[in-house]
Amino acid sequence: MPPVFSEETHRNLLARIPHCTGREVSEWLRTVKDGPAFFRFDEKVSWLRSEHDLAHGHAKAIIHEYDLRRAARKLR
């Protein structure tokens, strides 16, 4: 089960990603979308960390945001 972020922690992590990685969150979300089709949250996080050398917290925030947006699209 994915870890639960407080909304504030999640937003703070997302806000720091462009500064820390040099890439916008939208670019990272496209990377996840175009990447391997892992089923589990932790597999996606591990892939981002190993393939793109991201910090653990940033990788978790990106995958969490990706999952939130994907779920929101399904509700439409």
Image: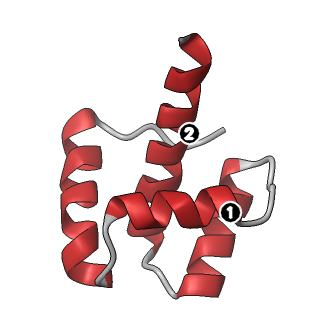
Tell me, for residue 5, which label it has, or none: none
Q: In this view, does 66 lie to the left or right of 45?
A: left
Q: Position of residue 40 (x, y in %)?
A: 76, 48
Picture residue at 80% right of the left edge, 47% below the top: 39
Quadrant location, the N terminus: top right
Q: In this view, does 36 lie to the left or right of 6?
A: right
User: How many C-alpha atoms fall within 10 Å of the one at disc 1: few (<14), some, or many (≥20)?
Assistant: few
Which of the marked residues, 1 or 2, is nearer the chain's N terminus?
A: 1
- Image vertical order of residue 2 relative to residue 70, above or below: below
Picture residue at 56% right of the left edge, 39% below the top: 67
Q: Quadrant of residue 26?
A: bottom left
**How many labels, in total?**
2
Picture residue at 62% right of the left edge, 19% below the top: 74
Q: Distance between the residues labelled 1 and 2?
A: 14 Å
* Nearer to us in this view, 60 or 69: 69
* Nearer to us in this view, 38 or 28: 28
- Image vertical order of residue 35 relative to residue 72, above or below: below
Picture residue at 33% right of the left edge, 76% below the top: 23
Give the colouring mode of the picture: secondary structure
Q: Which amino acid does label 1 sit on?
A: Asp
Tell me, for residue 34, which label it has, or none: 1
Q: Mark 2 = which residue?
A: 67
Of the residues tagged 1 and 2, which is closer to the observer?
A: 1
Q: Where is residue 9 in the image (x, y as percent from the top left)?
A: 24, 47
- Image vertical order of residue 25 relative to residue 40, above or below: below
Q: What residue type is labelled 2?
A: Asp
Q: In this view, does 25 lie to the left or right of 75?
A: left
